[in-house]
Structure formats: structure tokens, C-alpha cells
Image (cartoon, rainbow, N blue to C red):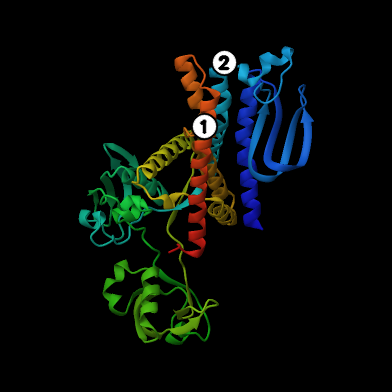
Amino acid sequence: MLTLFAFLFALALLIAVHEAGHLLAALSCGVRVLKFSIGFGPALLRRRFGRDATEFVLAAVPLGGFVRMLDEREAPVAAQELHRAFNRQGPWKRAWVVVAGPAANLLLASLLFALVALLGVHQPLPLLGAPAPGSPAAAAGVRAGQAVLATSIDGDTRGVRSWPQLELRLQQAALDGRRVGLRVRDAARERELWLAAPRPGVASRGVDAARAYGLRLQQPPARIERVLPGQPAAQAGLRAGDVVLGAGAAQAAAPAFDARQLLQAIARSAGHPLSLRVQRAGQVLDLVVRARREVDARGVAHWRIGAMLDERLPSVLVRLAPGPALQQGVRRTWELSMLSLRTLGRMLIGRASLDQLSGPVTIADYAGRSAELGWVPYLSFLAVVSLSLGVLNLLPIPVLDGGHLLYYAFEILTRRKVPQRVQERLQQGGLALIALMIAVALYNDIARVLGPFH
């Protein structure tokens, strides 16, 4: 229910903002608005407001919306009202009415990002784990435990405070196949490391940018948070607060040992005795535990020792004052918009994976997950979806707002309107392209839930 409510609220809000942009722009140009609708199909609520008795509708299917304006192409218009018809406006006014919808979504995204920055959000520190063998990070000398202080891409150096900030910078570089400079600090000193560009095609197969460069977020230490009575961990002598420094053959790697490695060691032990090196109150102890086999509801077997790990990552509260927060909101909207456009462009030429397209199932899933985490993550989710809606509608595809902007640009340059017959053919092509994108996005949604089809 939370997922459904969060998804429907997001749809209603973002559609309302988009259509409100068209509405306000039309009114500012003196165009008469006949109907403002959120959703399609049967009306759930219907009211009329204003001197023009504009009809406001909340419809049953919340998968879009529209603003219907006075227009001779749709119905006859009285002579005294012709100056208020949309089709009688100049191309600049029509373009303003069309672009105002996506612009409203981008403005909302900027304000939401600014609000998130103002409220503050806990984000993992940019602490590096052991790099992937053979990766650019390994070749550059990245070591577990190093903290990233700043990144450099083509002479553009920016400070880094959190792991998500680092990921965004890596995405921007990986998309264009650029090398990245990292200023890192470890126990010894600060140093500059340069990561070579990832292998061609690696960043286009749906692999996240950090993995493309071989960077990994340092996992939390293997700290025992709770031991269940009567289970193997309790029988071996483990206690809450113990920190596991190594397991089995990994005992020599104590400085880099983490919770993920402990879980892997337990799974590999397959019920055989597993030696653990444990730190407790300043002392180092050697214990032996034998994992117990358990089968879940799906019939999958797991090896468990009956202990809960403290998996909290070291984090920092990233919070800004109102002025810098607003600047960051605008900058983040711009950067993510450009990143989205470049990714879509690379999809068209086959240099980025279509797996990155998401449909309503994935969006609903993220809506529910972010809502469960609290208001700040949900606001971040709304900002990203609002930005995506704005960017999508600005694409130069007939049927979308960007397609209409192309018509008006042609009219401004040539002083001739695009013939209606040509517009109709282009609309058909645009509908086919949008239908194809929706089909790919739905396939990706289903594949994420059920696994890819073969």
C-alpha cells in the first residue's frame, strides 16, 4: 500500500506541475483554457473556476494529463474569441506555452534538490575498498582504506564529500571514456592517483561507473551486533561487539577484512569448521565456528552462524545554507539533465545499453523504497523523476513537447508553418517511437522482476 500510494502521489504531483506550466503560460499569453485534466478516462472530480469557467478534472487513469485550449483545429471558434485561440498566436508564444510544461518539471526538480540539500542527508563517506583486480583503479595504486578528497576531469577539479558525489563525477567521465584524477588520503599522506579510462564498451553495458573504473565502496568492518542464543556463533563464544579481523585463510588480511568477506567465508565453509580471528576489548582471540545449513521459503540453502552484523557505513551529514542549497539544486538538475541526454544519445547509436531504460514497475518500486526510508529520500526520488519527465518531454520527437518546438522553430526560420499533412505523418512516427521505448522499458521492468528472457 505504501508503494502504491507513493507511486500515485508522485505521478499526480509531477503531472499536475507539468500541466500547470502549460496552463500558466497559456494564460500569460491571453489564450483561453477550456480544460485542465490530471489523468485520462472517467472523471473522479470535476470543478469549474475563473472568468472563463475553465474545467478542472481529476480522472481515473493517472498516467498523464492535458490542457485543452481554444483552437480552431479542434472546434469552431466565435469571431470575438479568435484572438484568444492557441492556433492564432505567434510561433514565439506557442513555443512558450509548450516549453513551460517541461520547464516547470525542471524547476520543481531544482527546488526539490535544493530542499534536500537544505534539510541535509546522511551519505556514505567516499572511503575506498580494495579495487577490482586488473581494473584502472588497481593499476593506479588505489588501496583499501583511502579517502577520496577531490576528483579531476579534464582540468575540472571538484571536492568530494560523499560516495554519491563521487559516483556522479565518475558517471560523467565514464560516459565519455575519460580518465579521472583522484586526490586521496590514507594513513600516510595525500596523493594524486590517475585512473585510466575504462575499456571501450564497459560503461555502455549497464555497468555502473564506479565498477567500470574498478572502484568499490569500503564495506563496514565485520562487527557483531547481536548473537542469537543456542546458535553456532554463541556456541563458538562470539559476543556482541566483537570485531572479526579475519576468517580462515583471510586471517592475514585483517586490515581489509569486512562484513562482506565474512559472509563469503561463512558461505564457502559449507558447514566445515571455520577459524575466526576476533578483536574484543583490545584483545585478539582465535575462535572456531561451524555454520548451520538453513533452507529458505524458495528452497535455496544458506549457511548461517546465528549472528547479526552491524552493517552501518561511516557517513556524513551533507547540509547547505539556503543560498548554496539553491545553487546546488540548479547545478544538480543541469548536470543530471545533460547526463540523461548524453546517455539517451549513446543508446541511439548503440554505445549505451537499453537496459538503463526503466518503466512504471521500476519507478513504483523506487517510490515505495524511498518512501520507506523517509521524507528526504522520497524528495530526492521525486526530484529525479521530475527531471526525467522534463528532459523526456523536451526530446525532439513528434507527439512530445520537443516535437512541437521543432515545428515552431521551422516556422520562425522559414516563416511558413509545417504542413498539416506532414505533421500527421511525423506524429505517427513519433507515436511508434514512443511505443517502442515503452515496450523496451516494460521488458526491462519484467526482466528485473523475473529475470531476463532467453
Judged by depth in the image, the label closer to the viewer, 2 or 1, is 1
Q: Residues within 10 Å of mark 2 (few under 14, many from 20)?
A: few
Dot 1: element: helix
Q: Is residue 287 left or right of residue 41?
A: left
Dot 2: element: loop
Total label count?
A: 2
The residue located at (77%, 28%) in the rendering is: 49
| Most distant residue in the top direction | 80
Nearest to N terminus: mark 2 or mark 1: 2
> Which quarter of the picture shows residue 349?
top left
Residue 17 locus on image (x, y percent): 62, 35
Q: Callout 1, which amino acid?
A: Arg
> Which quarter of the picture shows residue 243?
bottom left
Q: Nearer the viewer, residue 337 or 39?
A: 39
Residue 293 seen from this side: yes
Q: Is residue 425 left or right of residue 160?
A: right
Q: Callout 2, which amino acid?
A: Gly
Quarter of the picture containing the N terminus is: bottom right
Q: Which residue is mark 2?
A: 90
The residue located at (48%, 60%) in the rendering is: 447
Residue 321 locus on image (x, y percent): 50, 37
The residue located at (52%, 80%) in the rendering is: 228
Disc marking residue 425: 1
Residue 235 locus on image (x, y percent): 46, 87
The residue located at (60%, 40%) in the rendering is: 14
